[in-house]
Image: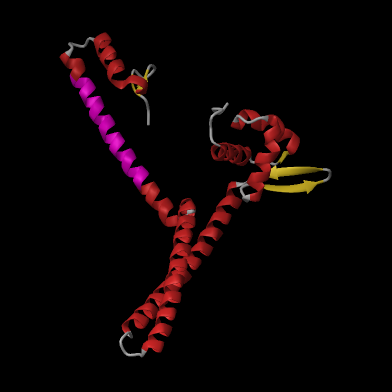
Amino acid sequence: MAPKNLPPQAKQSLIVNYIQNSLTVHTLKELEKTLPSVASINGMQVKDYLQALTDEGKIRVEKIGSGNWYWSFLSEEKKSRIDALAKLTVEKKKLDDAARELCDKLALATGAGGEHDDEGNAAQEDVRAGLVAEQAQLTEDLHTCKAELLRYRDADPAEVLLKKQQALALKQKAELWTDNVAILEQWLCHALGGDYEKLDAIKRSCYGDEYDVEAQGLKEL
């Protein structure tokens, strides 16, 4: 059972993972029995959590016969994320173009000073103030769009490839140090005159929770 003090968002993630990993559809009655132990929620809260996840598009629901059926497949979620990422990328490009155009207009309006009378200068100030306000709004929209893009990084092929490369590099480093530890164990065994009991005691002390009793050494990666 999950810890009871988890925030609602973490409990939602547990529910989605459970439904996706089940690879099947569920009735409301089934979920009311299983989800309390999956996400440490009260049975009366199941409907509220399912409704929230449905509203966010993280799970799907269809009324079949007299009851609702719920499901969520990883393939559907991945496609949804890719579509959302593509849409946000296009929107970000539009905002970038609009911001650049606005900067050009603002620079032009600012550089034109000194060539007009008082009435012309007042009109120029009004135009400039409007452009500054528009730029501020576009900047805010751009920040919002970038924040949305960060939410969908897991669906970005480039990000996925980068994470795989980082994971591989870490694994290779871990394997290298595992080999070094094995060599050190051999040297220590020789230094102790083959006293495996002393060697085992030292390994238990050094490895802590990473000590594998059956293997009498570090746990497998």
**Does residue 24 show up?**
no
Residue 30 shown left or right of residue 57 in the figure = right
Magenta stretch: helix, strand or loop mostly: helix
Q: Residue at x 18, y 12 (%)?
A: 192
- Using the rendered view, name the quadrant where residue 33 is placed: top right
Looking at the picture, how far across and down is residue 217, in whole percent? 32, 21
**Does residue 106 show up?**
yes
Residue 58 shown left or right of residue 98 in the figure = right
Looking at the picture, how far across and down is residue 125, in whole percent? 40, 80
Q: Residue at x 54, y 27 (%)?
A: 3
Task: In the displayed orientation, state which residue is furthest to the left.
Answer: 191
- Which quadrant would the N terminus be assigned to in this image? top right
Q: Residue at x 58, y 51 (%)?
A: 77
- Which quadrant would the C terminus be assigned to in this image? top left
Q: Report if residue 147 lies within the magenta region.
A: no
Instruction: Tell me: residue 160, above or below residue 204.
Output: below
Closer to the camera in the image, 190 or 5: 5
Instruction: Tell me: residue 129, above or below residue 6.
Output: below
- Using the rendered view, name the quadrant where residue 195 is placed: top left
Residue 87 shown left or right of residue 143 in the figure = right
- Using the rendered view, name the quadrant where residue 2 is placed: top right
Q: Residue at x 31, y 83 (%)?
A: 111
Q: Which residues are magenta?
A: 166-187
